[in-house]
Amino acid sequence: MRMKAAKAVFACLFAALAATAFAITGTNWVEDLDHPFVGLIVFFDENGEFTGRCSGSLISPTVFVTAGHCVAGATTARVYFQQDAGANYDPATGIDPITGYPESCAAGTLGVVCAESTQLYDFADYTDSPADDAAVVILTQPIVLPEYGVLPDENVLLTIGRGTANTLFTVSGYGLTQRWPEQTGKPFVSFRERLEGLSTFVNLNNTGGFFLQTQGNGNGRSGTCNGDSGGPVFLGGFDSNVIVGVTSFGLNTLCRGTDFAFRIDTPEVLAWINTFLD
């Protein structure tokens, strides 16, 4: 009963915040050239209509991990692994002519740095509950890279003490870099590139055990925003490949402040992801 109650509480919180909490923000981000397995994923419904974009990580040539709320309502997907996958996007045509984003894989890139999928799976039959916010996408074309994301040891986050501000995490994704209040009339800032930044540990205990809470803005830190959902949260600095969570939501409509990542180090989630690697 306690688990069901916790899921219900977080479902209400998520419903209120999901639209605003999905890029690496602040002024302390850098281009992410360290994690070539982090990709920009776009989703389409059964009619082939674009439904949204997120970030995520390959943990094998065909297994891509992202957030559960990203795959909701989608039936197919396409993933781009270029660091600047959407940087040349032309609003007039709705396409990046260099990569083909989001409508196609550019000539010569299919199965190299771009892939498609018709197999989208969400953890625990995701139904708008952040307590189930993980998903796996199986790529039709294997992407061969020198390295992939690494799954964490079981419950590794439980070894981190409350308020351990010196524990660093690296966040990576393709989302917005800055949002402004609507009344300012300023356009949002998006480089449409894979960026990374450092965040610090806040706690696990006030999130029902489902989430890693980090502080992502100010004092040399970087946060997450719309488009970073599903992107990896690595335990450690820029050289880490160990994914302990996927970006899920934040508490601020302007993407400033505290971030929450859905934990993938729990026994249940790890066991589920590993079924796709067998």
Image (cartoon, rainbow, N blue to C red):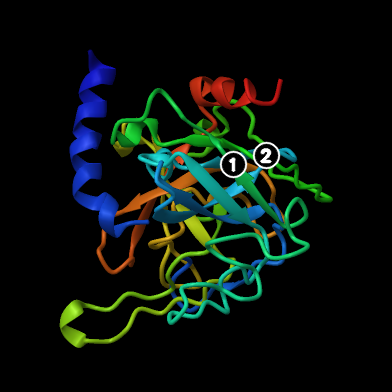
Residue at the extreme bottom: 185
Left or right, residue 274 beside residue 198: right
Vertical position of residue 4 compared to residue 169: above or below: above
Where's residue 176, x and y in %? 42, 70
Secondary structure under badge 2? loop
Residue marked by disc 1? 117
What's the distance in space between the residues labelled 1 and 2, CA to CA? 5 Å
**Residue depicted at 71% across the width and 20% down the height:** 278
* Extreme residue toward the right, this view: 146
Residue at image point 18% right, 49% down: 16
Q: Where is residue 144 shown, x and y percent of the image?
A: 81, 47
Where is residue 118 shown, x and y percent of the image? Answer: 55, 37
Residue 189 in the image: x percent, y percent?
41, 79
The relative height of residue 130 versus residue 56 in the rendered view (above or below) is above
Callout 1 secondary element: strand
**Residue extending farthest left:** 183
Mark positioned earlier in the residue sequence (1 or 2): 1
Quadrant showing the N terminus: top left
Q: Which amino acid does label 2 sit on?
A: Thr
Label 1 crowd (10 A; few <14 / some 14-19 / many >=20): some
Nearer the observer, 47 or 187: 47
Residue at numbered disc 2: 140
Number of numbered discs overlaid on the protein picture? 2
Q: Can residue 217 be seen in this view?
A: yes
In the displayed structure image, the side of residue 188 where residue 198 appears, left or right: right
Q: Do the numbered discs 1 and 2 sit on residues whose CB atoms are within 8 Å? A: yes
Q: How busy is the neighbourhood of tag 2: few (under 14 within 10 Å), some, or many (20 plus)? A: some
Please name the residue shown 71% across and 67% down the image: 33
Q: Name which residue type carries label 1.
A: Ser
Image height of 2 relative to 11, above or below: above
